[in-house]
Amino acid sequence: MKNFDKKWRDFPDYIIGITKEIWEDRGLATLNHYYAENIPMRFPSGLTIGNQAAINGTLSTLAEFPNRQLIAEDVIWCGDDEEGYLSSHRILTMGTHTGHGFFGAPTGKKFVIRAIANCAAKQNVIYDEWLTRDVSALVMQLGMEPKQFARDWIAREGGAEHCAKPFTPDQDVDGGYHSKGNDNEWGQKFADILTRIMSKDLSVIQLEYDRAVQAEHPGGKSGHSWADVEQYWMGLRASFPTAKFKIHHVIGRHDPLLPPRSAIRWSLTGKHDGMGMFGAPTGANVHIMGFSHADFGPYGLRREFTLYDEVSIWKQIYMQQG
């Protein structure tokens, strides 16, 4: 990799290595050179700009969860020295709530959740980022309820008119990464599956998923076989039946010692105009930043990991209800 530090043997090693340096080795200052000065970071909760915002956010999170660990489950990546590299880094993050912060007074409770970060890098520097965490699973593991947490979040920020706005496409800025991924067959296969699901063709699940599929979805929900997968996706789509589904980035890979895999970043944008997992329709305009990973086996899609931030969705709904 051109102009990357020689200690990294490949791009996944770089992503995993700097994550450990920053979070577990307390190398917050390394963000001054690992992250570009004006990097845009898109979270479902909003857009931040610059490595100083990343440093301050990391410091705040570590103060609240001092023993936090970030374990790499997978790094699915694409790119080259010219267009830039893009990693979709699936992380198992865990810790204990022993400090004050965003989640309130310390509860002493432990948590284990997933996060997925898409980071674009050139010449040893991350310069563009998209990231989501399973905030609803974290909230529940700390003994709170996601819908009420969203209401309280709005209130402590000054109410619906004054609170920080969750991320929507109109806020976005050009961070410099313009690739749409690669054309590997496994990425294209998964993109077709998700497109059919979001087009309400649920028959694709029994056609393309292994009957013994393991599925991980927001709220820390784990499921197995076709019925659980159907329930997850139907519950989401039923809440936003007229929303526009869009795929933004597709990666497919087949690496030694690993199954064929894919990572997709997608969005769902439109009105909360259906009855589903987000309750009775409110007509609220909602933008969902989604990330999905898939592993394929001899009988079809064998493991699926999908993440979006349910708490930020509730926040968008409640903000528009006043």
Image: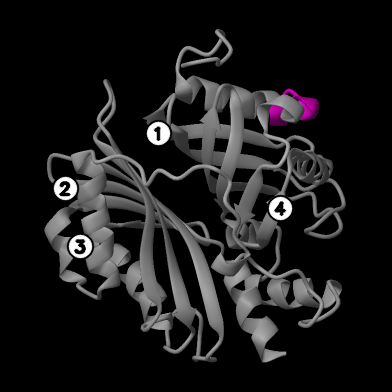
Question: In terms of secondary structure, where does tag 3 sit?
Answer: helix
Q: Earlier in the sequence, mark 3 or mark 4?
A: 4
Spatial CA distance of label 2 from label 3 is 10 Å
Q: Nearer the viewer, mark 4 or mark 2?
A: 4
- Mark 4 sits on what residue? 48
- Mark 2 sits on what residue? 300
Q: Which residues are magenta?
A: 22-30
Residue 177 % position (x, y): 50, 42
Contact (Cβ within 8 Å) of mark 4 with mark 2: no
Contact (Cβ within 8 Å) of mark 1 with mark 4: no
Q: Earlier in the sequence, mark 1 or mark 2?
A: 1
Spatial CA distance of label 1 from label 4 is 24 Å
Spatial CA distance of label 1 from label 2 is 21 Å
How packed is label 2: few (under 14 Cα within 10 Å), some, or many (20 or more)? Answer: some
Q: Earlier in the sequence, mark 4 or mark 2?
A: 4
Disc 3 marks a residue whose amino acid type is Ile
Q: Please tell me whether residue 321 is drawn above or below residue 243 in the rendered image.
A: below
Q: Residue at x 47, y 12 (%)?
A: 9
- Mark 3 sits on what residue? 205
Indicate the quadrant where residue 105 lies: bottom right
Q: Residue at x 76, y 82 (%)?
A: 160
Q: Nearer the viewer, mark 1 or mark 2?
A: 1
Q: Residue at x 31, y 64 (%)?
A: 228
Spatial CA distance of label 4 from label 2 is 39 Å
Residue 183 % position (x, y): 24, 41
- Mark 1 sits on what residue? 77
Spatial CA distance of label 3 from label 4 is 37 Å
Contact (Cβ within 8 Å) of mark 1 with mark 2: no
Residue 261 visible: yes
